[in-house]
Image (cartoon, rainbow, N blue to C red):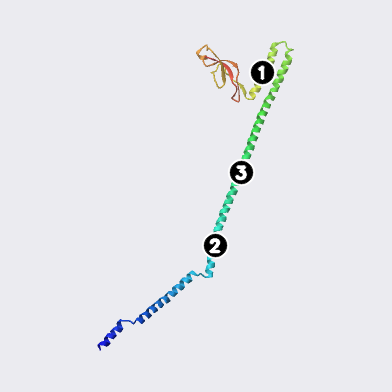
Amino acid sequence: MRHNKKRRHHDNGTQHPGTGQRNMEENTTNKNAQKAPENDVVVDEVNSTPAEEQEAGNVVAEGADEELSEEAKLRKEVDELKGKLDKAKNDELYLRAEFDNFRKRTLKEKAELIKNAAESAFKGLLPVVDDMERALAHSDDTTDPKTLREGMALIYKKLKKYMEQNGVKEMETTGNPFDADKAEAIAMVPAQSEDQKGMVIDTVEKGYTINDKVLRHAKVAVGQ
């Protein structure tokens, strides 16, 4: 009876060496069986279907098309800017040419105006020249100096009137304070009184203005 209990106890607490080996093989097989579906899933994730490959290709193509369209847009903008720059350069050249033509035309018109003004001025002097020639022609036949003088005075008045009509006026300098902008002091003479100091005592050569601008400075003697 005692021997049987010990054996039963040995059977319950100890496994046979062959039995343990078989259990380890079964556990390994079960584990491999459990891992197999996971490996299958990984293979399915890596290997894509033709539809997925086509969809991926379409996405890549769309991205490339967007890049090309963006590049084409930039090129278009660059071409537009180049066109505007060329137009601006052409406009600048045109304006420069127009300004140069305007300048030349203005200078020509100004020269013609001066020329025509001179022609008009000399044309108005011709009647005075005619009167002088007639007076000289009859001076030999005239024995009365008074008559000759009156004829010369008429010509002089006619000339002075013509000058005034064209804006030429005689300066009034004698008896006025000396003005260096209008007169030139060619002599300094002793003043007879304090009031004559700095005043024009005598006008040696008359001065004239044209349209209030000095045409010729007067030559005067100033008291000191």
Q: Position of residue 91 (x, y in %)?
A: 61, 43
Q: Is residue 79 above or below residue 125?
A: below
To which residue does mark 3 refer? Answer: 91
Q: Secondary structure at mark 2?
A: helix
Q: Earlier in the sequence, mark 1 or mark 3?
A: 3
Please identify the quarter of the rendering in which residue 143 is found: top right
Q: Residues within 10 Å of mark 2 (few under 14, many from 20)?
A: few
- Quick check: marks 2 and 3 in contact, CB under 8 Å? no
Q: Are marks 1 and 2 in contact (CB under 8 Å)?
A: no
Q: Is residue 2 left or right of residue 23?
A: left
The image's mark for residue 156 is: 1
What residue is disc 2 on?
62
* Image coordinates for residue 177, horizontal then vertical, percent: 53, 18
Magenta stretch? 155-159
Q: Residue at x 27, y 86 (%)?
A: 5
Residue 192 position, x and y percent, is 52, 11
Observer-nearest of 55 and 217: 55
The three-letter code of the residue at mark 3 reads Asp
Q: In the picture, which quadrant includes the N terminus?
A: bottom left
Query: Please, is residue 187 above or below residue 104 in the view?
Result: above
